[in-house]
Image (cartoon, helix red, strand yellow):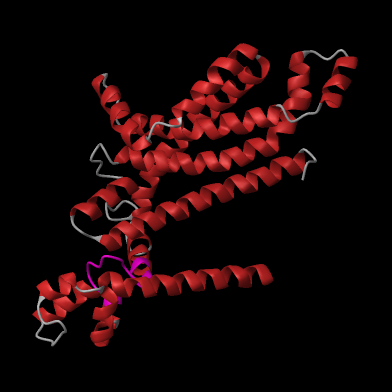
Amino acid sequence: MRSVLAVLTVVAALVALWYAACVPMNIKGVLTEAERAGAEVVPATARERRDAGEFGLIARNSFAIPATWEQDRPRLPAPHQVAIELWETTVKKKITSKRSLIYHGWVTLSATLLGFAIGTGLGILLAVGIVHSRVMDMSVMPWAIVSQTIPIIALAPMIIVVLYSIGIQGIIPKAVISAYLSFFPVVVGMVKGLRSPDGMQLDLLRTYNASNAQGFWKLRLPASMPYLFASLKIGIAASLVGAIVGELPTGAVAGLGARLLAGSYYGQTVQIWSALFAAAILAACLVALLGLLERMVLKRMGMA
């Protein structure tokens, strides 16, 4: 009960700060609209208001504060505007509608899951090779670390152009970008997990004359499970980011990235924020699903 109350308190504080931030962010636009509607505002001209501070404008035009939470195209939409947009684009729209966030979320999710599967498989294979081969440890691991220093926003267009040039289009380029972001957490977590058994445990297996393969399946792999699931949670969130980023350079017409692009083209900030929240909710659901799977697996293994 206390934890729930603490979470609700934090959420309420964040919402209050959000509403407060809307006032200075939107006040100039509200005053411009009020002036056009014939209301008396201070200063009277848009040129004077442009150079004035937001808090000074608020103090001299307090009547305009409620309107900062109701603009059609605000700089910063209010929480209830984002909530209404989410409701109308999920519950009130058919799943097959091009205006449905569920439809766009599924397009992004399909690329996310494919990229996550590729990245996870590649990450586990690399981790096994790094743990069992000194050569791979010295050669592959540094390159894996260096690869993550390249900004994905710069790398994504190059990946898409190269794949398009050889006729690979659709979901594959986005999945490749997702895999690129998700494989590194899996590599690091899996390497840490496979190396987690201490020397006494490894020596015990040697006294039983266990082979390397038996040591892997009976000791290293079970011991790596908590580390693997921790890295998978990071990887699935990174994979979702990769899928969204992969939709941006292509001018996609479907997907959460496409919704972000459309909102930025037409100045629909409420649409942009609703797509961002939809992506956050989707990521939270994926991480929660992995958490449930982790509890089931670890409980079955007697580790929870």
Residue in front for this viewpoint, 256 or 71 = 71
What is the x, y in percent for residue 186? 57, 32
Magenta stretch: helix, strand or loop mostly? loop
Tell me which residue sits at (70%, 40%) in the image: 297
Is residue 283 at all visible to an observer of this figure? yes
In the depicted structure, whether residue 96 falls above or below residue 13: above
Could you say which quadrant of the image residue 88 lies in?
bottom left
Residue in front for this viewpoint, 107 or 202 = 202
In the depicted structure, whether residue 183 falls above or below residue 274: above
Tell me if residue 75 is in the magenta stretch: yes
Tell me which residue sits at (26%, 26%) in the image: 161
**Over which residues does the magenta segment extend?**
68-82
Give the left or right position of residue 139, taking residue 56 as reference.
right
Kindly give the residue lying farthest to the right in the view shown.
Answer: 207
Give the left or right position of residue 304, taking residue 100 as reference.
right
Tell me which residue sits at (39%, 31%) in the image: 150
Placement of the C terminus among the 4 image quadrants: top right
What is the x, y in percent for residue 72? 22, 70
Is residue 61 at all visible to an observer of this figure? no
What is the x, y in percent for residue 105? 38, 49
Residue in front for this viewpoint, 199 or 186 = 199
Placement of the N terminus among the 4 image quadrants: bottom right
Tell me which residue sits at (51%, 69%) in the image: 11
Give the left or right position of residue 199, taking residue 35 as reference.
right
> How many marks overall?
0
